Image: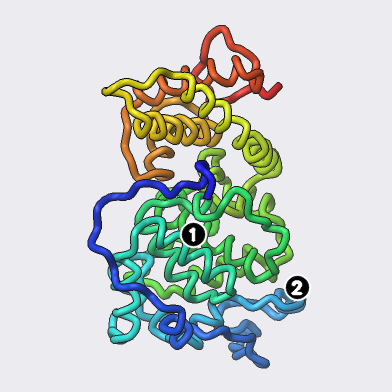
Amino acid sequence: MNAESQPLKTADMTKPEPIGSALFESWFPPLTRRKSHRRTDSGDDAHGNTKKQFKAQKVGYVPLSSLLDRTSSEMRLRPSVSPLSYTVDPDPKKLRLENLVSKLFRDDLVNKFVTAFSSKFRVAALVYADELIRRGIPPAMWFSPHADRSTYDINQKSDLTVYDLRWLRFTYPVHSAKISYKRLFKNSLTHKESAFYSTAEFLIYGGNREPWEIVASLKLSESQQYEMCQLQSLPLSRRNEVTNEMRRKVFTAIKVHSDRTRKTKTFTDDDAKDTVFRRHRLWLCSRTVTSYGVELIRRYEQMTGICISVDIAKRQLKIVDEILAEAHIVKRKKGRKNKAKTTQT
């Protein structure tokens, strides 16, 4: 494991009971699409999909809601107090699973999600995703920056969109006033989860809609898009690609600068190592915000679980700018503006 991929520090928690794959596979087996769909008198199926929409679906597309129906009916019909919870009539096995997931360390939870998602255990991945959302960790931070998304199939891509929509509903409930898709934000205390999934499936449209089209329909701000793993405009996606290309060079430059710094009793090797990671993560956060203020420290807390002050963040980023300019990675600036944009050479 290289230095860049070192696990983040997390708050002290009681070590949870390990979750074996057999436990999840027994409750969340891989499911295939049903051969028939229940139709209502209006010609729609149970989730509100029209006949026209089914004709438009790409080959192999299976709505996530159809798996939820088959796995447990109360997951869709009997929500709990939380907008992301499903149970009212408790299932002992499900309660045990949710209890174990809630006790996982942050890094373990992310790794479990990635494993379930890669293995195409879609409902299990949704349980992990909902727990990550509850903890305030945006979908954009669930995956490795080196993950090859070109290998994802149509169902995995549609699930990424569902995660983004659930993050939007949980984190920005007032956003419903800006768009016409208000069924995404229905309070699950008084409405069925099917309202959310039918609207999500309409937006996905059988896997035929591009992410930037959904972004435009939902009127997502630039800051909101940076928190999404799938719903991003084309310019923002290109900027993220540039960031991923630069991140290794930036990390190396910061580490080289730290190695040249003299170590003392009050500034040990461990302190220097922590400083390298902190500065690198602050630089990554600065690439995903529109201003250096509350938004920056909020993004840093989302990434690391650690809260810092605005003054510390600005001071550290000023040092990073000097390091990168000295390493000829970016152009030297005369003065920093309030915009979090770095000019690439």
For the point 49% across and 70% down, the residue is 125
Q: In this rendering, which labeled residue sits more in front, label 2 or label 1?
A: 2
Q: Which residue is mark 2?
A: 58
Vertical arrangement, residue 345 with respect to residue 58, above or below: above
Instruction: Spot the residue most to the top.
Output: 334
Q: Is residue 172 visible?
A: no
Secondary-structure class at tag 1: helix
Quarter residue 189 falls in: bottom left
Q: Amino acid at mark 1?
A: Lys
**Residue 27 location (% of width, % of height):** 44, 86
Q: Nearer the viewer, residue 4 or 180?
A: 4
Q: Is residue 295 left or right of residue 35?
A: left
Residue neighbourhood size for the residue with mark 2, other residues' Cα within 10 Å, grouped as few (<14), some (14–19), many (≥20):
some
Q: Which residue is mark 1?
A: 182
Vertical arrangement, residue 204 with respect to residue 210, above or below: below
Vertical arrangement, residue 209 with respect to residue 330, above or below: below
Q: Amino acid at mark 2?
A: Lys
Dot 2 or dot 1, earlier in sequence: 2
Quarter residue 271 falls in: top left
For the point 44% across and 57% down, the residue is 169
**Residue 132 location (% of width, % of height):** 41, 59
Q: Nearer the viewer, residue 2 or 51?
A: 2
Q: Nearer the viewer, residue 269 or 304?
A: 269
Which label belongs to residue 48? none
Q: How far, Cα to Cα, is label 2 from label 1?
A: 26 Å
